[in-house]
Amino acid sequence: MSWRRHDTATSHFVASTDDPELRLHLRAHGDEPGRIPVLFVHGATYASRLYDVPHPGASWLKATALAGFAAYAIDIRGYGKSHSPAMERSGRPYACAAMARRDIDDAVTWILARHDRSRLHLVGGSWGSITTASYVAGIGGSRIDRLVLYAPIFAKKNDGWLSLLADPHDTARLNPNFGACRLVSETGTRARWDAEMPEGANWRDEDVFQAMVRASLADDPHSARHDPPAFRAPNGTFVDLFEAFSARPLYDPAAIRAPVLLIRGGADPTSTRADALQLLDRLASRQKHYLEIANGAHFVSAERQAPSVFDAATRFLQDGAPHAR
C-alpha cells in the first residue's frame, strides 16, 4: 500500500520571527477556521510525521480532526519540512528547547489569528513534552487551554540515555563531538524501536512503520544522498535531554496551571513511570491526570495500541475525561 495515497494533510508555512531565512512547516487536518485548534509538537527524532503517519487509522492528527478539532503539527526548525540554512552552516548542536519555544510561539500566534481565538490546546511528545511544558510554564501560559504531555520526560536520572549522550572522557558533560544534526535511517529507527520493546513483543505493524519512515525520508530533500537513505535530525535536543536525564529540571512544573494529561506506554524506558509521576506531583494544575497504556513502548502512538492514545487524548481535550478504550 502506497503511503502517498494517504498523505492528505494540508501544509502551511509560517514565517519565523527569529530567523528571516526560516519558514516553519505546519501540517493540518480539519483546519477550518471555525474549529477549536490543537497544536502537536514532536520529539527529538521524528518530526510531525509521527503524528500523521500516512496509513489508514495511524494518524493522530486525522483522529483529532474527526473528533471535531482543527489539528495542526509543527516541524520545529531543522526537522521535516522546516528546512534550515542555519543548521547547514552550524557546527554545534542545533535547535535546542529555547529555539523550539520560539517556533512554538510563532505557530501558536499564527493559528490563533487564523481561528480568531485567544487560546488553543497543546500536545507535546517526548522531547516535545519539555518544549511545550516549558512554553506553558513561561511565555505561553495564557494562550493554552489544555496540555497533553505524551511520553513525558522531566528530570529523572536515566543511565541508559546518559551512556549515549555523555562525553566518554568526562561523563559529567555532553559529548562535545555532536555536530548540528545526525542522520536517521530505517535500520537505525528499527533498532531503537526494537530495543524499547520487551523481547518477543509484537506491538508494531510493519506497514505503519514503513509509511512513517518512507514519508520522513521524503520530507528531507537530502535523504537520497546517503547510502542507505537517511533524513537529518537536529542535535540540539541532546543538550536538553542530557540535562533532563541528569535529573536537572529545565522548567518549573509549579508554574503550569492549565489542565494536564500525562500519557505514556507502560514499557517505555525513555519516559519512565517514576519520572512521569514525579512530574504529576509537581504540577500546580487543579486538574491533572496520569494514564499508562499497557503493551506500549516509547512510540506507542504509532503502535497497535495507538487508538487508545488517540481516544484518551481526545476525551481529555473535549471534556477532561482521559479514559482510554
Image (cartoon, rainbow, N blue to C red):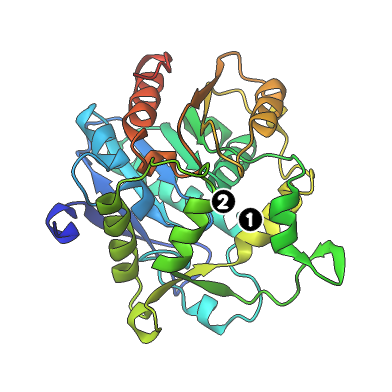
Can you tell which quarter of the image residue 283 is in? top right
Q: In the image, is 241 to the left or to the right of 9?
A: right
Secondary structure category for the residue under label 1:
helix
Q: Are the two marked residues, 1 and 2, in contact with CB atoms closer than 8 angstroms?
A: yes
The quadrant of the rendering that contains the C terminus is top left
Vertical arrangement, residue 199 with respect to residue 324, above or below? below
Q: Which residue is mark 1?
A: 98
Label 1: how many Cα within 10 Å (few below 14, some 14–19, many 20+): few
Q: Which residue is mark 2?
A: 101
Q: Residue furthest front?
A: 200
Vertical arrangement, residue 130 with respect to residue 13, above or below? above
Across and down, in percent, residue 40 comes to: 41, 43
Can you tell which quarter of the image residue 61 is in? top left
- The kind of residue on which mark 1 rests is Ala
Vertical arrangement, residue 221 with respect to residue 134, above or below? below
Secondary structure category for the residue under label 2:
helix
Q: In the image, is 325 to the left or to the right of 45?
A: left
- The kind of residue on which mark 2 rests is Arg
**CA distance for labels 1 and 2:** 5 Å
Vertical arrangement, residue 323 with respect to residue 180, above or below? above
Q: Residue at x 75, y 70 (%)?
A: 175
